[in-house]
Image (tube, rainbow, N blue to C red):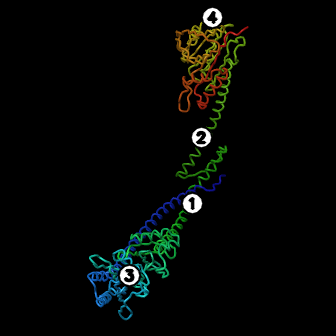
């Protein structure tokens, strides 16, 4: 009985539910990103409108403050103005512009009068009326104040950094300073600074009226990065945005500060400056004063509705996935139940029980078709196994007979090396490796008389049993025909005549036959279409033997063969082989080749004949990767010359 830890029903439900969940996650993720980007876009637009509107209000007030000092500086440059006239101009400016807390004209040393080092008429507001003071003394040396020094050195009007004016307005303020000049001895000379003071309390009240959700806020920083307004009063004039960035170790806040001081406008995602929680910050410059205004939207509040909606969608989706999983498992089990029974029966069949009962089903769907197909397969397996048993027995008999035939074939080939103890003039070794159980290659050697040694090598056309039988007949004919005094071409002629008689299958053999005179070293040979032997001289010269006239042996009667003659010197060798050597192929179908055979024989010169053939055979097996496509037969004969005694 097969037990499924995770059956098809479970897997089907898991795959289906997982696929739906993946699709949902992709859709939900896309929706969330799109919605969040849309909220951020709308927030940026709202922040932009809010910030620009606030900046416009601040700029409007600052410009209205600036107009009075600008006009008064022009009046001062036209020439000396009496004390009463200056005070009248200052009072008039305060009456016309309620945003101005105080204004004054701070003259350069001795510019108002030759005996007056300090001259600073100053009109300011009190709770009940407008009043004035004539400022300037060693205790209140206004020449050292930033609102005086900076416009004097820069030569143009500007707003000062916020400061607490002790001895003047005695409040936290910012001063707009306009330098003025007069011609003295024809030279434009700095004469003084017209100032207008604005209380930062008014500016803080303006900023405080802007509401950003529940905990959002607006803040303003000066040209040096100091907080001019902030919901936390501890920050105002006591902390700069760069000092806060250093305390928090926040490089992003430092970059925001650089952007604000650089007069840029941007919308960034950043932690809140007070609580460290994430938020969205929009900042833009106040062009009139060089300050910068920023609006911060808390991310949690901004995305609160989206977060609640996302949690609701996730909970509903999880419930839906659970219901879907249960439904799919239930439906899948109704389908896979019969499959489970068939799986049990199939396991019995796999164990060898072909008589197990297959489950019956009347369903016409795919499960019913599969059940009937399994029943048909069961019957087919019984019949096939019966036929396979008979075929296996027959194949084993054939393989046994082929092995016997191979043993018989190899037994008719000479196996004793060196061949004759009575012929010390030569050394010889031969090897045959069949590509199949039996093959068509042959070699043989024998003595025709005490001085003449015959040797032959051949390759029968075709493969298998027919080739092995033809090979055996050919070998027998060569030995029977090569009697003393018969030249090699005549031997090939007689063997050809016998083999061609009644050769309905048109089989043939390529053969090389030679006779060596062991006393003189003279070799007479004849080639019947076989691969050219290799002559290996004692001095290391390696070359193929020349071809003599003659076609294959046994194909037809009347073939003509030619005799060749050469003389071996002591130490010369004669290498014979079949085409299974040079036509061996590697995995890329590249042949071993005639050229490589010559190179390898030259490298192996001087080794014993048996070792030469052993190394060549190993080399060929490795080259073909064990996939031998043709019989390999090699014979190597070394002529030692007449021996003493």
Q: Considering depth in this image, is 79 or 427 the residue closer to the camera? A: 79
Q: Which mark is residue 175?
A: 3
- Can you identify the residue that label 4 sits on? 485
Disc nearer the start of the sequence (1/4):
1
Give the foreground label among 3 and 2. 3
Label 4 crowding class (10 Å Cα cut-off): few <14, some 14-19, many 20+?
few
Q: Secondary structure at mark 1?
A: helix
Quadrant location, the C terminus: top right
Q: Is residue 509 visible?
A: no
Looking at the image, is 20 positioned above or below residue 568?
below
Q: Considering depth in this image, is 295 or 284 the residue closer to the camera? A: 284
- Can you identify the residue that label 2 sits on? 380
Q: Considering depth in this image, is 494 or 632 the residue closer to the camera? A: 632
Looking at the image, do the residues carrying marks 3 and 2 touch, with CB atoms under 8 Å apart? no
Give the foreground label among 2 and 4. 4
Disc nearer the start of the sequence (3/4):
3
Disc nearer the start of the sequence (1/3):
3
Disc nearer the start of the sequence (2/4):
2
Q: In the image, is 230 to the left or to the right of 411?
A: left
Separation of disc 1 and disc 3 at Cα?
A: 79 Å
Looking at the image, do the residues carrying marks 1 and 4 touch, with CB atoms under 8 Å apart? no
Separation of disc 3 and disc 4 at Cα?
A: 140 Å
Separation of disc 2 and disc 1 at Cα?
A: 35 Å
Residue sitting at the far right? 645
Q: Name the residue rendered at 43%, 68% in the picture.
A: 35
- Can you identify the residue that label 1 sits on? 329
Q: Secondary structure at mark 3?
A: strand
Separation of disc 3 and disc 2 at Cα?
A: 107 Å
Q: Name the residue rendered at 49%, 63% in the picture.
A: 24
């Amino acid at each position: 009985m097969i037990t499924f830890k995770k059956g098809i029903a479970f897997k089907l439900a898991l795959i289906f539910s997982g696929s739906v969940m993946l699709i949902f996650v992709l859709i939900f993720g896309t929706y969330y990103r799109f919605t969040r980007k849309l909220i951020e876009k709308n927030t940026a637009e709202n922040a932009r409108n809010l910030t620009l509107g606030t900046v416009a209000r601040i700029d409007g007030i600052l410009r209205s403050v600036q107009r009075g000092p600008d006009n008064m500086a022009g009046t001062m440059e036209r020439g000396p103005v009496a004390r009463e006239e200056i005070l009248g101009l200052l009072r008039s400016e305060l009456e016309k512009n309620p945003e101005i807390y105080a204004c004054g004209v701070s003259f350069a040393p001795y510019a108002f009068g030759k005996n007056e080092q300090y001259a600073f008429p100053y009109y300011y507001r009190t709770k009940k009326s407008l009043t004035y003071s004539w400022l300037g003394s060693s205790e209140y040396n206004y020449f050292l104040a930033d609102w005086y020094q900076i416009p004097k050195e820069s030569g143009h009007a500007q707003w000062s950094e916020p400061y607490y004016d002790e001895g003047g307005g005695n409040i936290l303020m910012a001063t707009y300073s306009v330098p003025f000049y007069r011609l003295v001895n024809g030279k434009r000379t700095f004469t003084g600074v017209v100032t207008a003071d604005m209380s930062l309390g008014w500016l803080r009240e303006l900023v405080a009226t802007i509401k950003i959700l529940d905990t959002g806020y607006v803040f303003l920083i000066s040209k040096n990065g100091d907080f001019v307004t902030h919901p936390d009063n501890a920050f105002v004039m006591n902390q700069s945005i760069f000092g806060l960035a250093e305390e928090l170790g926040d490089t992003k806040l430092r970059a925001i500060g650089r952007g604000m001081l650089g007069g840029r406008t941007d919308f960034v995602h950043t932690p809140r400056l007070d609580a460290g929680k994430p938020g969205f910050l929009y900042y833009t410059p106040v062009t009139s004063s060089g300050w910068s205004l920023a609006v911060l939207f808390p991310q949690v509040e901004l995305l609160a509705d989206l977060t609640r909606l996302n949690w609701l969608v996730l909970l509903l989706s999880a419930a839906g996935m659970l219901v879907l999983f249960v439904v799919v498992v239930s439906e899948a089990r109704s389908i896979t139940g019969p499959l489970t029974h068939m799986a049990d029966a199939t396991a019995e069949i796999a164990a060898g029980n072909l008589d197990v009962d297959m489950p019956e089903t009347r369903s016409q769907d795919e499960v019913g078709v599969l059940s009937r197909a399994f029943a048909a397969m069961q019957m087919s397996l019984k019949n096939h196994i019966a036929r396979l048993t008979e075929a296996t027995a027959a194949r084993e008999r054939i393989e046994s007979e082929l092995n016997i035939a191979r043993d018989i074939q190899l037994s008719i080939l000479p196996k004793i090396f060196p061949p004759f103890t009575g012929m010390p003039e030569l050394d010889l070794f031969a090897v045959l490796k069949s590509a199949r159980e039996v093959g068509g290659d042959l070699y043989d050697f024998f003595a025709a008389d005490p001085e003449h040694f015959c040797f032959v090598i051949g390759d029968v056309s075709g493969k298998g049993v027919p080739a092995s039988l033809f090979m055996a007949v050919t070998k027998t004919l060569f030995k029977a025909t090569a009697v003393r005094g018969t030249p090699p071409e005549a031997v090939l002629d007689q063997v050809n005549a016998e083999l061609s008689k009644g050769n309905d299958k048109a089989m043939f053999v390529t053969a090389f036959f030679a006779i060596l005179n062991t006393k003189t070293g003279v070799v007479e040979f004849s080639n019947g279409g076989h691969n050219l032997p290799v002559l290996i001289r004692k001095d290391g010269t390696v070359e193929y033997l020349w071809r003599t006239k003659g076609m294959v042996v046994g194909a037809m009667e009347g073939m003509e063969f030619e005799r060749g003659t050469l003389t071996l010197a002591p130490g010369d060798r004669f290498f014979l082989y079949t085409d299974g050597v040079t036509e061996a192929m590697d995995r890329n179908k590249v042949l071993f080749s005639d050229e490589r055979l010559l190179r390898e024989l030259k490298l192996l010169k001087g080794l014993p004949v048996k070792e030469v053939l052993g190394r060549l055979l190993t080399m060929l097996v490795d080259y073909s990767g064990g996939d031998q496509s043709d019989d390999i037969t090699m014979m190597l004969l070394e002529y030692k010359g007449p021996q003493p005694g």
